[in-house]
Amino acid sequence: MVHMNSNEIKEELNRKGIKNTKAKSILLHILKNSHAPKDVSTLYEACSKITSVNLATIYRSLRQFNEKNIVQEFLSSDGVAQYEYIHQGAKSHPHFECESCRQVFCLGELQFDDALHFSNMAKKHKVNYINITLTGLCETCQETAQT
Ligand SMILES: [Zn+2]
Ligand SMILES: [Zn+2]
């Protein structure tokens, strides 16, 4: 059983104007405690271990979380949507995606100068979020390739 601070989760959903259901609070809890982006099937599996939930509910909840800026959504190179909780005051950070095992890793936050540089590249477009994904072989897959 996952330890949950259900009051905190409930308040957060409330603040964002989202109706609190068991599935949504569990989903939010899982997202908040993930250290890397997760795809829908991984989130569905994790939620299913705790409560009975259907896939459509997970999709709907993730869309709602994304609309309310609770999570950010981005596509991995094979077109699979990944979701990551937006921590309060967190700055954009790039991701690294392994071409072999498809794992996605969070990299360090962009520094002010980096963010400024990319914002300037957008010229007169208004930048809301910077989404950078580097691809290649992760450490584990490099070792596997060598042996
Ligand atoms: Zn890998
Ligand atoms: Zn990340």
Image (cartoon, rainbow, N blue to C red):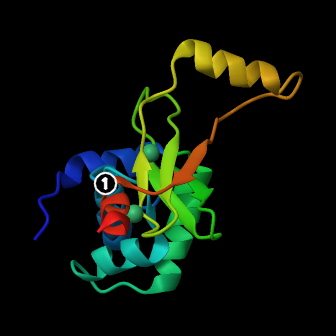
Indicate left or right for 14 with 134 as reference. left
Residue at the spot of label 1? 34
Q: Is mark 1 within 8 Å of ligand 2?
A: no
Q: Is residue 97 visible?
A: yes
**Quadrant in which the C terminus appears:** bottom left
Residue 25, given in percent of the width and then of the height, sits at: 32, 62
Residue 121, given in percent of the width and then of the height, sits at: 80, 24
Indicate left or right for 106 with 115 as reference. left
- Name the quarter showing ligand 2: top left
**Quadrant in which the N terminus appears:** bottom left
Q: Label 1, secondary structure: give it.
A: loop
Q: Nearer the viewer, residue 79 or 126?
A: 79
From what the image shows, is residue 119 above or below residue 58?
above
Label 1: how many residues lie within 10 Å, few (<14), some (14-19) or many (20+)? few
Q: Report which quarter residue 118 is drawn in.
A: top right
Q: Is residue 20 visible?
A: no
Kind of residue at badge 1? Ser
Question: How many numbered discs, if any?
Answer: 1
- Residue at image coords 62%, 21%: 115
Residue 92, given in percent of the width and then of the height, sits at: 53, 32
Residue 79, given in percent of the width and then of the height, sits at: 65, 69
Q: Report which quarter residue 26 is drawn in.
A: bottom left
Indicate left or right for 30 with 123 as reference. left
Furthest residue to the right?
Answer: 124
Indicate left or right for 83 with 33 as reference. right
Q: Report which quarter residue 63 is drawn in.
A: bottom right
From what the image shows, is residue 108 above or below residue 95?
above
- Residue at image coords 31%, 50%: 35
Q: Nearer the viewer, residue 107 or 27?
A: 107
